[in-house]
């Protein structure tokens, strides 16, 4: 008897429906075709044990299973449940008339219980698009798949529950989630709050500007000055995600298998990889491409602590994704694209000893050591970082002050108001949503300067020995400062503040 059941494969952040054809005929053997990987080939042992432990048996006949389209590589153990149901129906051990109306996915344990799978959300979206009635999957993944409305999503704990439902014996209820309630939950209670930070008012202001314009930022200062503490609090002042952004972000984390019984993600991601990270782990890839850290930080923050400690070639692979806001991974037979629109926040010590320019500590690094240390960061990468700010240690008086600093919720209100101004400004433009994404044409149009501002910028560039690449960055940041002030035009005070945020362009840092 020939039976068709349906599973799904995930490539990039999109799913493709897989038709699993099971044919049982005279003879002996188990033949699995359609480019399965080793995890799928090993499924016969898991299936045989699970069937026996649940009162069923592996047919002692010739079993031929084709996974169509047969020229598409299939990977992972998530097809165990699909194959099991197909074998049971084809061998007439169960009667399941409507089996072709469902997508069935799950990894089997030997006792018949189910283990979680990756990519449940993209699979559910594709199942709804193709008109399937429902989706059976492990209970651990049910919340992410239930975000999709118009599809019956059944979270099951073992293979017997699926069998009973298909035979009309079980009483399995589809899981429903109120997406909007899930989305707005805990928005005003960030885990890390700026009210915990003592002093550092100028750095907080800098962070607010970076968040308002989506600018990349680098913090330079000695050990213990609070660089990491400040960076961890940046997501708490970013504007709340839109439903579209939340869905995009949740899809990527679903594909990577990182959701852990969470429905829709409503907090912007914060990723902080260690400096020993490899190229592939950062941008994504592998023999079966998986999203890297830059894609996991999509719509959120990627924090690189101690930037010069990262391998130079690892930092260089970020240059193209920083510009294009997506990363494309090519293999011989296919290409996948992962979105990677993130805010880069980096921190570094000013010298190998960490105490360059600190009046209270002796300088222990020679000019040659300084140059070698700073040269690990290339000019083109620094060119993509709009704001450079020096972080100084907090004095005792500020640390011991019992007063409460401004909370993240209050700062976020100002940031959100500035972002709304930018959204209205770039409404007609497809790929531009905030100031950091402006190109030269937009800078000329939206950052027009009066004579006073032009003269101020000219003087600053000459006196501080600022590089030519700093010019556009200063104008972008000045436009964001103007938006925070709700000003229609950029004036000299906005330019003056923006000039302060180019520390690494000054003579004496990188020369």
Image: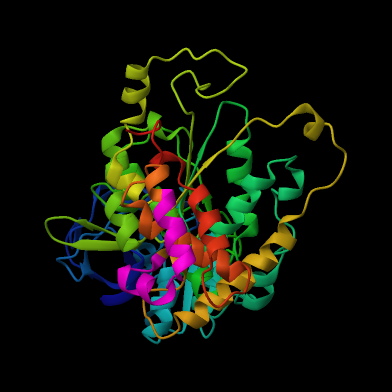
Q: Main secondary structure of the magenta part?
A: helix
Residue 38 pos. (x, y %): 25, 47
Magenta highlight on residue 492: no
Q: Residue at x 40, y 86 (%)?
A: 428
Q: Is residue 217 left or right of residue 180?
A: left
Residue 252 seen in the current view: no
* Region in magenta: 437-460
Residue 480 pos. (x, y %): 53, 65
Residue 26 seen in the current view: yes
Magenta highlight on residue 443: yes
Residue 102 pos. (x, y %): 42, 78
User: In the rendered view, how is the structure colored?
Assistant: rainbow
Looking at the picture, does residue 41 appear above or below residue 427? above
Q: Residue at x 71, y 49 (%)?
A: 194
**In the image shown, does 423 or 176 lie closer to the viewer?**
423
Residue 511 pos. (x, y %): 32, 33
**In the image shown, does 87 or 209 lie closer to the viewer?**
209
| Image quadrant occupied by the N terminus | bottom left
Q: Residue at x 62, y 27 (%)?
A: 224
Q: Residue at x 53, y 21 (%)?
A: 355
**In the image shown, does 15 or 436 lie closer to the viewer?**
436
Count of numbered circles on the image: 0
**In the image shown, does 269 or 342 lie closer to the viewer?**
342
Looking at the picture, does residue 169 appear above or below residue 64? below
Looking at the picture, does residue 179 appear above or below residue 402? below
* Residue at the extreme right of the image, as rendered: 402
Q: Is residue 312 left or right of residue 342?
A: left
Q: Is residue 42 left or right of residue 213?
A: left
Q: Is residue 358 left or right of residue 465?
A: right
Looking at the picture, does residue 366 appear above or below residue 11? above
């Amino acid at each position: 008897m020939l039976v068709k059941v349906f599973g799904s494969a995930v490539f990039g952040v999109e799913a493709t429906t897989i038709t699993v054809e099971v044919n049982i005929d005279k003879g002996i053997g188990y033949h699995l075709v359609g480019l399965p990987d080793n995890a799928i080939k090993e499924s016969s042992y898991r299936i045989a044990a699970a069937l026996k432990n649940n009162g069923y048996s592996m047919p002692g006949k010739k079993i031929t299973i084709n996974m169509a389209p047969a020229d598409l590589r299939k990977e992972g153990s998530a097809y165990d449940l699909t194959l099991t149901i197909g074998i049971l129906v084809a061998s007439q051990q169960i009667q399941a008339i409507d089996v072709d109306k469902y997508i069935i996915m799950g990894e089997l344990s030997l006792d018949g219980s189910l283990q979680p799978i990756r990519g449940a959300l993209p699979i559910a979206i594709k199942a709804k698009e193709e008109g399937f009635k429902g989706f059976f999957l492990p209970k651990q993944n049910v919340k992410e798949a239930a975000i999709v409305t118009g599809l019956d999503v059944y979270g099951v704990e073992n293979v017997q529950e699926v069998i009973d439902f298909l035979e009309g014996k079980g009483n399995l209820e589809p899981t429903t989630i109120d997406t909007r309630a899930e989305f707005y939950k805990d928005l005003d209670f960030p885990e890390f709050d700026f009210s915990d930070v003592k002093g550092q008012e100028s750095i907080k202001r800098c962070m607010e500007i970076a968040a308002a314009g989506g600018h990349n930022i680098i913090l330079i200062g000695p050990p213990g000055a609070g660089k990491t503490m400040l960076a961890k609090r940046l997501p708490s002042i970013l504007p709340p995600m839109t439903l579209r952004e939340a869905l995009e972000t949740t899809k990527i984390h679903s594909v990577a298998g990182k959701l852990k019984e969470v429905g829709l993600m409503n907090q912007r991601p914060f990723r902080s990889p260690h400096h020993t990270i490899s190229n592939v782990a950062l941008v994504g890839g592998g023999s079966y491409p998986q999203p890297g850290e830059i894609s996991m930080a999509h719509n959120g923050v990627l924090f690189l602590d101690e930037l010069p400690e990262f391998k130079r070639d690892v930092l260089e692979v970020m240059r193209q994704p920083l510009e294009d806001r997506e990363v494309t991974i090519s293999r011989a037979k296919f290409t996948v694209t992962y979105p990677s629109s993130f805010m880069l926040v980096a921190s570094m010590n000013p010298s190998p000893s960490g105490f360059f320019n600190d009046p209270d500590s002796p300088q222990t690094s020679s000019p040659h050591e300084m140059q070698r240390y700073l040269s690990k960061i290339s000019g083109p990468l620094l060119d993509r970082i709009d704001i450079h700010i020096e972080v100084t240690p907090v004095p005792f008086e500020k640390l011991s002050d019992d007063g409460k600093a401004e909370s993240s919720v209050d700062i976020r209100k100002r940031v959100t108001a500035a972002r709304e101004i930018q959204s209205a400004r770039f409404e007609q433009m497809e790929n531009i949503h905030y100031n950091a994404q402006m190109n030269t044409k937009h800078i000329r149009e939206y950052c027009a300067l009066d004579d006073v501002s032009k003269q101020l910028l000219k003087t600053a560039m000459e006196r501080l020995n600022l590089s030519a690449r700093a010019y556009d960055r200063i104008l972008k940041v000045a436009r964001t400062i103007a938006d925070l002030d709700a000003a229609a035009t950029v004036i000299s005070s906005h330019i003056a503040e923006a000039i302060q945020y180019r520390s690494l362009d000054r003579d004496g840092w990188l020369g």
